[in-house]
Image (tube, rainbow, N blue to C red):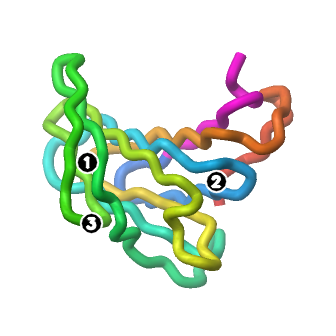
Amino acid sequence: MPLGAELNLATSATTAAQRTSLRDCSGVLIVLIGATSGNATITEANASSGGTSQNLAQITTYFTQVNGVWTRVTQAAAATITAATGGLAAVFIPATMLSDGFEYVAASHASGSFLIIQVGLKVARKPENLRDVRA
């Protein structure tokens, strides 16, 4: 089972912008679900709470899904992604994309929630021994 060996998971509800650590992984796949309209904003932070938080304005490619069909979206560097109503949007944020000294990401949307999948774990553990990646 890849949970614990290859990936770990976290969730973030709508505007909560739950910070997620990229420590001990190669990156995170952020999946937007349940959106009704508008953009999701992806930010980076240098502390688990407080500290400096800023838009991660480096996203140039992400994917959307409507009716089971994935579509690649290419854009000028931005901190936002958009899902069609009732569809999905997914963006991979490699740890190397973050600014120096930053190791947390968060996502926020007015109506959609997020599944955040930490991938490329550097230390494999049984699922019950995984650490909480939420900040």
Q: Which segment is the magenta one?
A: 1-11
Disc number for residue 111: 1
Residue 59, picture quadrant:
bottom left
Q: Is residue 3 magenta?
A: yes
Q: Position of residue 24 (x, y in %)?
A: 74, 52
Between label 3 and label 2, give the one nearer the viewer. Answer: 3
Q: Earlier in the sequence, mark 3 or mark 1?
A: 3
- Which residue is outermost to the bottom? 51
Secondary element under disc 2, as helix, strand or loop, is: loop
Q: Is residue 22 above or below residue 112?
A: below
Kind of residue at badge 1: Ser
Secondary element under disc 3, as helix, strand or loop, is: strand
Disc number for residue 134: 2
Kind of residue at badge 3: Ala
| C-alpha distance separating marks 3 and 1 | 23 Å
Disc number for residue 77: 3
Q: Earlier in the sequence, mark 2 or mark 1?
A: 1
Q: Is residue 83 above or below residue 38?
A: above
Q: Is residue 15 magenta?
A: no
| C-alpha distance separating marks 2 and 1 | 21 Å
Q: Is the N terminus in the top left, top right, bottom left or bottom right quadrant? A: top right
Which residue appears at 14% of the width and 36% of the height? 85
* Label 2 close to label 1 by CB (< 8 Å): no
Q: Earlier in the sequence, mark 3 or mark 2?
A: 3
Q: Nearer the viewer, residue 129 or 57?
A: 57
Kind of residue at badge 2: Arg
